[in-house]
Amino acid sequence: MNGWNRALWLSALVAGLAGSATAGTEAQPSTAPAAASAHYAGAPTRTAIVPAEAMRVIRVEGNEPLLDPVSPLWAGAKPVAVTMQPQAVTTPGNPQPAITTLNVRSVHNGHWLSLLIEWKDPTKSERVVVDQFGDQVAVELPVRFRADAPPNPMMGAPGERVSIVQWRAAFQADLDRKREMTIRDNYPYAQTDLYPDQVLNTLDMRAYMGAGGVDNPVTKHRESPVLDQVAEGFGTLTVKQHQEADGKGVWKDGSWHVVITVPMAPTTANSPRLEPGSQTVAAFAVWDGGSKEVGSRKSWSDWVPLALSK
Amino acid sequence: MPKVYNWQIGREMEYPYAEARPRKQFAMIMDTNKCIACQTCTVACKTTWTSSRGQEYMFWNNVETKPYGYFPLGWDVKILDKLGIQDVDGPVYKGKTLFEAAPEGERVLGYLPDDLDYAHPNISEDDSLGNMPQGAFITMPHMQWMHYLPRICNHCTYPACVGACPRQSAYKRPEDGIVLIDQMRCRGYRECVRGCPYKKPFFNSMTRTSEKCVGCYPAVETGRQTQCTITCIGKIRLQGFISAPDKAREDNPMDYLVHIVKIAKPLYPQLGLEPNVYYIPPIHVPAFYTRQLFGAGVEHAVHTYRKAMDDKKLLAALLLFGATPMILDRFKLEGDMAVGFDDKGQEVVRVPMREPTFLRVAFDEAYKTHRSNIT
């Protein structure tokens, strides 16, 4: 059976198994969740999606990653309208997603593959508190692409690893702020006392800092506004130890313009090697923070063929 | 969905994971009749665990006044309203649990609170049900009443947070049943915040992950009771380990009070999570209210509590609350002493059933002075 069917079969097979997932490292992505990930009854069935036209990735000059959403280098790349479908395979689902189309174009310079992803969003969502979620978009590439057997587009499957680079508006805001975030960035009138890290030594204080004390990558991400990740199916998403992807997002006049760029000759085994003149596929997922989309409450696309110019 | 057995509702129910009870189950009993809402427990928990960035608004332990107080705002009335009126009478729950009532595409029936719902932790503190009319006098139960409800994470047997998390970042420890959110694995989706009906996972806007009561596991692992328990001024709490009903041990104070004497009841058992924090119901509050809060058997619990003076063994168990910081695995009544033992069989506390009295003479010969009564 093909990768997509196999994912569903595996989900049904492990139904009823209890236990907690392992923390997961890059070599051993964490175990997939059981039971509840099976296709839930009453979900909209996966209608035949008209495959997106192939995206031609034109070659441009340069050695550095292309990070500027308004660079003239994008002009020669033809955008492709990617259909985004509701996530309805695993729970919690998102039957009525906010974003149904992404406009994507792509260039490479032999060293970096860059994608410019644009979509309409009247609300710029970057403040993350309990009832507010940030805007996000992600690009998925198979780590090893085989034209006759593409991996499961739904975050891969065991043995079919995918590389997922996720840009977050909240990280973009962190970087644009150019200083450490404080509680007053979210709550301007907050009054606070001393924090444990202001009175305890480095070793002792980490126990009282929650995720900040264990260097959770979604907490402090200083390198770039993107998370460079690998996955082998739902619930296995793991942040790579060495971050090589980069990106930049700009919101203007009711639209997001986000660049995500990946090295074509990466140093880790969990990132795809991309050769000029070769083919691969890419898929996308997007979250509208303003509609409280996060995690599996997203819209996602099927594979879009990519043809890299020589 | 797998079927699991929930003894508090007297039947099997659906849950995203198969039944897997821990080797020991962390549990706490709170005597609401002794709580004075001094909030010492709240401050103890806050200064221990939630003094860091993003945790400023969190109260992993909170004490609210019923009927009109809540933290976050309306947490219980909102979920009861969403679930709809259910038949809670009788030993077997005939209504739906939160898992059985989960809408299409969701794992549990829940909702995400507004940010501002957390801005009023003391709302309606000390407000009673209504005004006393002119000339009224107190009856039992009170016609106008209020009571305090101290709350922590219930470390449920079937946690909604564990069931809701799509990444299995929330988990239940097999060694002691304490429920934790893995701070390395969490990505801040807040499915746990949506799912938990008691609203005890909290989202940290600085770390962008969700956090919750950790059951003071570093203390519990070394045989010490939780911070909120040992600092309680009124000695209303006892923390220990509870067994499943069919394995209840009469000399385990938790099993004795919950399973045998049945004086301590779970909080909103009809939601179906099998919470492990148990309450001795307030004796002055009418049963029509406490039955919704604690389930069937509240009248029996109140009746038993009011006659505790006639039951020496029950009184011995109650006197061990707040008597020692160590977790008691076993207790016994030895003459006129309540004795508690840790899990290694060591005696850790001995409480006299009757407080010793000393008569002091009115005129002290040694100091040549009178003693006066101080009131």
Image (spheres, rainbow, N blue to C red):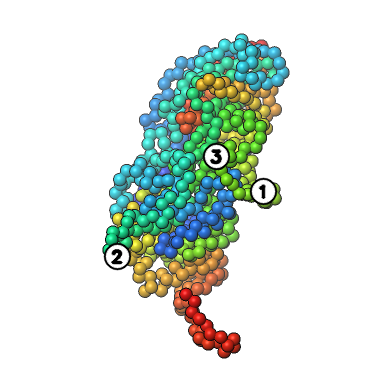
Residue A243 horizontal side relative to residue B212, left or right: right
Q: CA distance from mark 2 to mark 1?
A: 55 Å
Residues indicated by labels 2 and 1 sit on the same polypeptide chain: no
Above or below, B85 against A149 in this view is below
Are the residues at dot 3 and dot 1 in contact (C-beta closer than 8 Å)? no
Nearer to me, A182 or A220: A182
**How far across and down, in percent of the image, does residue A30 sit?**
57, 38
- Indicate the quadrant where residue A31 lies: top right
Q: Amino acid at mark 2?
A: Phe
Quadrant of the frame with the C terminus of chain A: top right
**How far across and down, in percent of the image, does residue B132 sit?**
31, 59
Marks 2 and 1: which is nearer the front?
2
Marks 3 and 1: which is nearer the front?
3
Disc number for residue A187: 3
Q: CA distance from mark 3 to mark 1?
A: 21 Å
Label whose residue precedes the other's in the sequence (3 or 1): 3
Chain letter behind tag 1: A
Q: What residue did someone put label 2 on?
A: B137
Query: Within 10 Å of the Cα at label 2, are there few (<14), some (14-19), or many (20+) other Cα atoms?
Result: few
